[in-house]
Amino acid sequence: MSTHRLYYDDAYLQNFEARVLSCSIAEPVQGASGMQPAWEVLLDQTAFYPSSGGQPNDLGLLGEAAVLDVRDEEEGIVHIVDREVGEGGIKGCVNWPRRFDHMQQHTGQHLLSAMFQERFGLPTVSFHLGGEICTIDLQGAEPSRDQLIGTQRAANKVIFEDRTVTVRYGTREQLARLGVRKEVEREGLLRAIEIEGADLQPCGGTHVKSTGQIGMILVRGCSRVRQDWRVEFVCGRRAEELASKDFERERVLMGLLGCGLDELPAAAERLAAERDANFKSLRSALQQLANLWAVQLASTAPVVTNGARIVSLLLRGAHPELLLSLATEIAKNERMIALLVLEESGQLVFAQHPTAGKDLGAVLKSVLAAHPGKGGGSKDFVRAKLADPGASAAALELAKSLAGA
């Protein structure tokens, strides 16, 4: 028996009554404190929206049972709940803040997609309503900054005009004659959402009654995803919250940089230029230190098997850049091996002159087998980082013994 979908005709319905057709044990589901028992409930009718079309499912209550998930399956709408419910009459209550948020985001997506297609010929090929950010994937050329801002402005203009949003029903042919934005292949009676004078699109989701209830649309970014362009956006309450967070971040940055809002970009550019210059100077100083230190260390390095000489150092409080420079300089000397480990981070660099005749790749493999981490390299040069920096000293001692010290 198919479940009657109350949300199709009234997305604002929060409380409803239904009849429980069945309740059976389901697979455990992930809860806040781990896996928990669950039951599958079928109703004769429901106001709960199942995950579909890029829109997540509703949450709420069925009697005393918490609704954990809602799925659209062959036998009807399946409600996953946290406890068993008895057959017969039951009252349902939809989590309204979550539902209305989804209505704002989904209707906003229809409007934004319509503006991209109408103004720039960029059709939407997919939609995802995330917990914080929503996305649409556009097919075609990369939208420019002006196109993103222009589309946002056009969509918000329709929002501010508070146009009517209505549900229409018709066959595929009837909707095509009315100018549907994207035709579908399904036959029979279809449900479509019409935004007055802006969009007509087949959709089974929940939507607001007028564009003014979307609040506003805020486009957050655009990036390449495979062959398409993914546009990030938020609507309504989410837009207000993100704008407030943006303002707070700007306020903090203005305080740190000692500038006004309009001066932030220039101040950030100056800071980046200073950072790059300072890093260049630091790298030069570290290289000079490595050159001088390598000479001293190489001259006093003890001789081990096969006439090779080993420098092993457990560095404390050193800059990570020094590790690489120093190991490289030491290994420029014939028959020299450098085994360097930075204690605080567990970073290690092993390097040797080819005449030293060791296989540092094999040494590293054995070290990481005893002290897990990630890294790699060649016979003469390897880099890695230990998962546990506390094992730095032990890893160095093991490397020394494997290298023949």
Image (cartoon, helix red, strand yellow):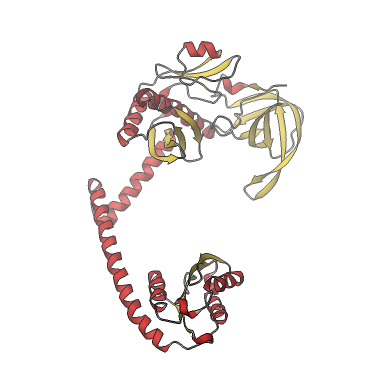
**Horizontally, is 317 left or right of 392 in the view?**
left
Q: Is residue 335 above or below residue 185?
A: below
Give the image location of residue 223, x and y in percent.
41, 41
Q: Quadrant of residue 326?
A: bottom left
Give 377 or 77, whichever is nearer the viewer.
377
Residue drawn at point x = 54 percent, y = 70 percent: 361
**Horizontally, is 354 left or right of 87 in the view?**
left
Q: Is residue 56 above or below residue 381?
A: above
Whether residue 338 is visible here, answered yes or no, is: no
Give the image location of residue 271, x and y in percent.
26, 57
Q: Is residue 209 above or below residue 145?
A: above
Give 41 or 121, whichever is nearer the viewer.
121
Q: Quadrant of residue 15?
A: top right
Whether residue 190 is visible here, answered yes or no, is: yes
The quadrant of the rendering that contains the N terminus is top right
Q: Quadrant of residue 8?
A: top right
Count of residue discs:
0
Give the image location of residue 115, x and y in percent.
38, 25
Q: Residue furthest front?
A: 355
Give the image location of residue 85, x and y in percent.
74, 34
